[in-house]
Image: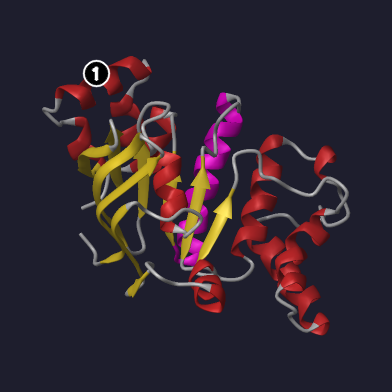
């Protein structure tokens, strides 16, 4: 396994008396795709919010790219968050902005010199096959194209870690496959580390190098995708069976998981 770019150690998170995470340990391998799976309410989204500093853990430690997250505030926290890019479930594009304006938005926010913006946006659109869509609005795009624009916007600032929040939820099988291919393509073109939250088991195992299974606030199983499928953990097997999809077929299309 490659060295971790993000490490979670004994992380706990409570909201009042309700304990969501009960001691999570996880290493996110640099340059690989880690998919976090688990049932609704298992703590997947809370874990990711802790990773990027949107929530503060009740206990434990998170280290991102060699830097401890605990205690960071102001510009130091903003700088650490800039290492992450986020592709939201519904792409979260600005409806009143064109594709060009959506992708340019992070550059404008960071006050990048205006003369540099057109070339950077044009390159990003070219890399992701979005040439010709610059003047279109989100309502004129297919679901897959909206996801691609969301990725272009998230990657425009060259983050080290890309997070995808339920990227295939609500999509038809054809568009789901397109989104999976987009994630794999982004991995190759942008050389990022990817963390994907997913309920879609076929999609998860199609793209995953490593899989972390969250159960009752802990990581119940973690490892290469092919090893998770072969896990003897009854909770893992129950969850995989309940998905009703061919995990073996998904793994075959990926190539069998990480080495």
Q: Main secondary structure of the magenta part?
A: helix
Locate residue 14: give its quadrant: top left
The residue positioned 38% from the left and 37% from the top of the image is 43
- Please name whichever residue, 100 or 14, is drawn nearer the observer in this view of the structure: 14
Residue assigned mark 1: 238
Graded by Cα atoms within 10 Å as few (under 14), some (14 to 19) or many (20 or more), the crowding at tag 1 reads few
The residue positioned 74% from the left and 68% from the top of the image is 121
Locate residue 229: give its quadrant: top left
Q: Tell me where residue 162 appears, x and y as whole percent.
A: 49, 57
**Side of 155 relative to 70 (left or right):** right
**Side of 215 relative to 159 (left or right):** left
Q: Tell me where residue 215 appears, x and y as whole percent.
A: 28, 31
Range of magenta residues: 173-192
Q: Residue furthest front?
A: 16
Q: Is residue 230 shown above or below 210?
A: above
Whether residue 227 appears in this view of the structure is yes
**Side of 199 relative to 90 (left or right):** left
**Side of 191 relative to 136 (left or right):** left
Q: Is residue 174 magenta?
A: yes
Quarter of the figure with the N terminus: bottom left
The residue positioned 51% from the left and 55% from the top of the image is 54
Q: Tell me where residue 6 appears, x and y as whole percent.
A: 33, 63
Locate residue 74: give its quadrant: bottom right
The mark total stands at: 1
Whether residue 209 appears in this view of the structure is no
Q: Is residue 130 magenta?
A: no
What colour scheme was applied to this rendering of the protein?
secondary structure
* Label 1 element class: helix
């Amino acid at each position: 396994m490659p060295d971790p770019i993000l490490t979670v150690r004994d992380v706990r998170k409570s909201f009042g008396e309700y304990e969501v995470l009960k001691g999570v340990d996880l290493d996110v391998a640099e340059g690989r795709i880690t998919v976090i799976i688990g049932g609704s309410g298992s703590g997947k989204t809370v874990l990711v919010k802790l990773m990027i500093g949107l929530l503060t853990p009740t206990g434990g430690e998170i280290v991102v790219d060699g830097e401890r997250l605990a205690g960071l505030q102001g510009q130091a926290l903003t700088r650490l968050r800039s290492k992450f890019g986020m592709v939201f479930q519904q792409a979260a594009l600005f409806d009143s902005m064109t594709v060009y304006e959506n992708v340019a938005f992070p550059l404008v926010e960071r006050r990048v010199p205006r003369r540099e913006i057109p070339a950077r946006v044009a390159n990003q659109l070219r890399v992701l096959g979005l040439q010709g869509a610059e003047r279109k609005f989100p309502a004129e795009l297919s679901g897959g194209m909206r996801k691609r624009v969301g990725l272009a916007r998230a990657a425009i600032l060259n983050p080290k870690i890309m997070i995808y929040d339920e990227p295939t939820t609500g999509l038809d099988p054809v568009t789901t496959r397109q989104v999976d291919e987009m994630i794999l393509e982004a991995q190759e073109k942008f050389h990022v580390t990817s963390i994907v939250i997913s309920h879609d088991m076929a999609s998860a195992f199609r793209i995953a190098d490593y899989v972390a299974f969250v159960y009752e606030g802990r990581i119940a199983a973690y490892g290469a995708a092919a090893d998770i499928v072969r896990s003897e953990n009854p909770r893992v097997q129950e969850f995989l069976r309940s998905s009703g999809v061919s995990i073996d077929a998904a793994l075959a299309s990926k190539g069998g998981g990480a080495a």
